[in-house]
Amino acid sequence: MKDNNSRRLAVDIGGLVLKNPVMTASGTFGYGEEYASFIDLSVLGAIVVKGLSITPREGNPPSRIMETASGMLNAVGLENVGVRAFIDVKLPFLREFDVPVIANILGDTPEEYCEVAHIVNEAEGIHALEVNISCPNVAKGGIDFGVNPDLAFKVTEGVKKATDLPVIVKLTPNVTDITEIAKSVEDAGADAISLINTLTGLSIDIEKRIPHLNNITGGLSGPAIKPVALRMVWEVVRAVSIPVIGVGGIMKAGDALEFLIAGAKAVQVGTANFVNPRSTVEIIDGIVAYMERKGIDDIEDLIGTLKT
Amino acid sequence: MGGLRGDVVAMADPEKSIETGIIISNREIFKDHFLMILRVPTDFRASVPGQFLMLRREEGDHPFLGRPFSVHSLYSIDGDTVMEILYRISGTGTALIAKLNADDRVTILGPLGRGFDVPRRKKKIVLIAGGMGIAPLFYLAESLAKKRRDELGETVLYYGAQSSQYFCGLDRLKRLCSSLKLSTDDGTAGYHGPVTDLVADDALSFERDDSALFACGPYGMIKEMARIAGKFSIPCQVSVEEKMACGIGACLGCAVRASGENTSKRFMRVCKEGPVFDTGEIDWNYREG
């Protein structure tokens, strides 16, 4: 597929072909509705919807967010309408657009992940799954699935069995060696990997000596985490052979290009959507402008070209 | 409690947009309190009183999130559309916004959210403002003054501030409202004590079917207004403030707990389902303070 400027932007993510490499990051784009009055959703590479659980979750009590230096902490608590309400109420709206929909799924147990994956698999208009393994494993004392290679393997393997759709596993950066987890989910059959999820952080109100967030800790996102995300993407790209999707602090086209040069086949734009609802479109335009300026005809000729 | 929302003046839901505003002036009216006057595009959609904007400096990356402000006034002057924003420095973001000068540019996203729904044919409209809570209520008073010229009925403003020098726009408010009742925390003007005391004292005189209350102020004050409105069964809408990142319903940061009467969603978004709520919609124990 070529765009108007004859630049080839399409990328293949584990069998899912995107018209361009720019998607939305889960939890920052709702189910698309909020952004449809600002942009044409059909121009996006893909939409990754807010994480879906087997039953609705009400999320954490406020305060849920706090801006920090070049970033924000959030502890929304995976509030979502539940996978069935998503399919019945939210998905019909997204089907109106010419854009792949990726369902981000989560659970408290490996079985719950599989159940959500199975339900999503039966729905019309979902093109891939993204598995959020940054969730506490309730049965195993609350340790996150994503920090343990064996648990990450188990969840990935189960989800793969429950669906025919491409499976992307989204990694948490809150680990000692991200390549170990990446290799584990690749071995379990993941079709692609996205990283990074938020970095766990804390912010304190010194007057009251209380945390700014009701949940005490929260996930840090925004420009502050971009160098960490970029480093981890670069490490994972060299450790696995499946496609890697870069996420973390992408605000402008230049940020997205850094991830592509580091070897990510696609990117997700998250917190930037909160600042400017048109960020994704401006980033796509900026990538095209860069390719024109550099005389690059095919985005594949740019991906992974970091000179070291 | 019967809400106001079944019986409203039809107001279009204006489409939101991203625009550039150019600052005409941004001056401190008293300590840490500022009035920003902005020129906005002439086709800027008219906002309903109570709606808000996300405002961000065009230059600079810190802070990077916009900040929510209610519209204080919106009018045409010499062919320009002019918007006023009344605000208080409450953190790093507003401190930097306070440093902006004439001709500086800001990005404004809006108008956003659900504003005040003003019922027709109420004899008495009661506005209750605590401190900066006057910001959206001033715009509501302006809009009511235009509408109610040909209607019977009065608009009464109860307005509380820390001290007598901390009232904003009293001269203009006197022209817009039928009567003004003031209170101060330090007793330097009007009643010495919380403004909600004044309202509670008068509440028996409000005819419950012919009055409507609109309040904005600190959390403790609007929580008390919710109690008074419930006790006297008078419909009351309040404008709620919470931290928010996006202002358009995506980040889910600005959650308030829905009351038992509203169990379909445990949390509501201030930016989307609000910022104006009927007091009965909210579980007022959703946060401390």
Image (cartoon, coloured by chain):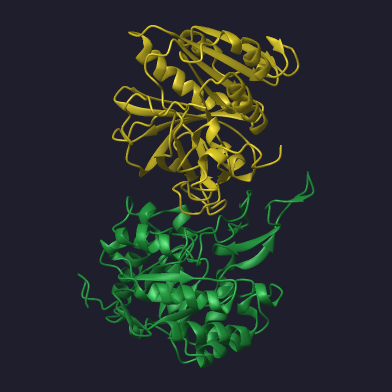
Chain colours: A green, B yellow
Q: Position of residue B245 (x, y in %)?
A: 53, 50
Residue B175, compared with residue A76, is above or below; it is above
Residue B23, compared with residue A89, is above or below; it is above
Q: Position of residue A288 (x, y in %)?
A: 31, 70
Q: Position of residue A132 (x, y in %)?
A: 53, 73
Q: Residue at x 46, y 30 (%)?
A: B50
Give the camera-side residue of A285 and A221. A221
Kindly tell me whether residue A194 is visible in this rendering: no
Compared across the picture, whether B235 is left or right of B165 comes to left
The answer to which quarter of the image holds residue B225 is top right
Give the camera-side residue of A265 and B32. A265
Q: Residue at x 76, y 50 (%)?
A: A210
Q: Residue at x 32, y 41 (%)?
A: B15
Give the camera-side residue of B30 and A20. A20
Mark count: 0
The answer to which quarter of the image holds residue A291 is bottom left
